[in-house]
Image (spheres, grey):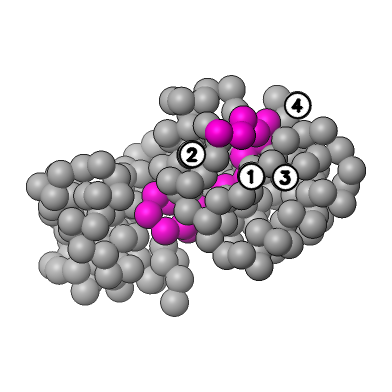
């Protein structure tokens, strides 16, 4: 039996994922988590063999969870399961160390196959995710789109600012000082040629970094 952890902040989504996993017969859900901190704690306590992680979660997002688990549990295969199909998320997830990336829309058909693939040591990308990754590689590491110039941490700070989080709240979520978060905010304004948080929020919405 493949031991699976499910991390998603929506109870209904996790219930549906659990059914998909456990109906296949060769897997079991050993833990669930509703936020990033809980996901990391559950990995430590239950030792899953595959972690299925959403990107958009309260507190620590999925990208940060992947980064931290890569350090503490480098052999654990992590599969990103998200509603986001945008190129920037695919690229950041793979760079962070995820072994697979599928969307929730494709989960009914692909989730079980993806879990088996990453558990066996392989990688799994949907066609759309693979195309997005190829487009980024074709542009090079310093591509021509505004988002290409942002680091993963800058994108995380941008998302939280757009969601209305304060500098102190962002600092606490990522174990940073408020001064460091202010520095990231200043870099975002400069790199994106924007003037204030309202324009940062508009940019995040336009680029689908946050949900309407």
Q: Is residue 122 visible?
A: no
- Give the residue at x 21% y 74%: 198
Where residue 55 sits in the image (x, y, percent)?
50, 53
What's the distance in space between the residues labelled 1 and 2, CA to CA?
10 Å
Please give the residue where the numbered disc 1 appears in the rendered image. Answer: 31
Q: Please provide the residue range marked out in magenta.
A: 45-61
Q: Nearer the viewer, residue 158 or 173?
A: 173
Q: Nearer the viewer, mark 4 or mark 2?
A: 2
Q: Which quarter of the rendering shows the N terminus?
A: top right
Please give the residue where the numbered disc 3 appears in the rendered image. Answer: 29
Q: Secondary structure at mark 3?
A: strand
Asked if the residue at tag 1 contacts the one at tag 3, i.e. Cβ–Cβ closer than 8 Å, the answer is: yes
Please give the residue where the numbered disc 4 appears in the rendered image. Answer: 120
Q: Residue furthest front?
A: 45
Is 7 rendered above or below residue 46? below
- Give the residue at x 61% y 49%: 32
């Amino acid at each position: 039996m493949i031991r699976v952890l499910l991390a998603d902040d929506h109870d209904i989504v996790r219930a549906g994922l659990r059914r998909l996993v456990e109906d296949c017969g060769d897997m079991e859900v050993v833990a669930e988590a509703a936020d990033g901190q809980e996901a990391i704690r559950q990995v430590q306590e239950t030792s899953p063999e595959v972690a299925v992680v959403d990107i958009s979660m309260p507190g620590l997002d999925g990208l940060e969870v992947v980064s931290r688990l890569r350090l503490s549990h480098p052999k654990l295969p992590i599969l990103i399961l998200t509603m986001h199909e945008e190129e920037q998320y695919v690229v950041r997830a793979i760079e962070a160390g995820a072994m697979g990336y599928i969307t929730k829309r494709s989960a009914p058909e692909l989730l079980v196959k993806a879990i088996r693939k990453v558990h066996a040591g392989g990688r799994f990308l949907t066609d759309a995710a693979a195309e997005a990754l190829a487009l980024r590689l074709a542009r090079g590491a310093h591509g021509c789109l505004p988002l290409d110039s942002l680091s993963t941490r800058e994108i995380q700070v941008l998302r939280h600012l757009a969601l209305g989080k304060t500098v102190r709240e962002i600092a606490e979520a990522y174990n940073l000082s408020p001064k460091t978060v202010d520095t990231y905010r200043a870099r975002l304004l400069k790199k994106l040629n924007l003037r204030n948080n309202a324009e940062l929020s508009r940019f995040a919405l336009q680029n689908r970094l946050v949900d309407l």
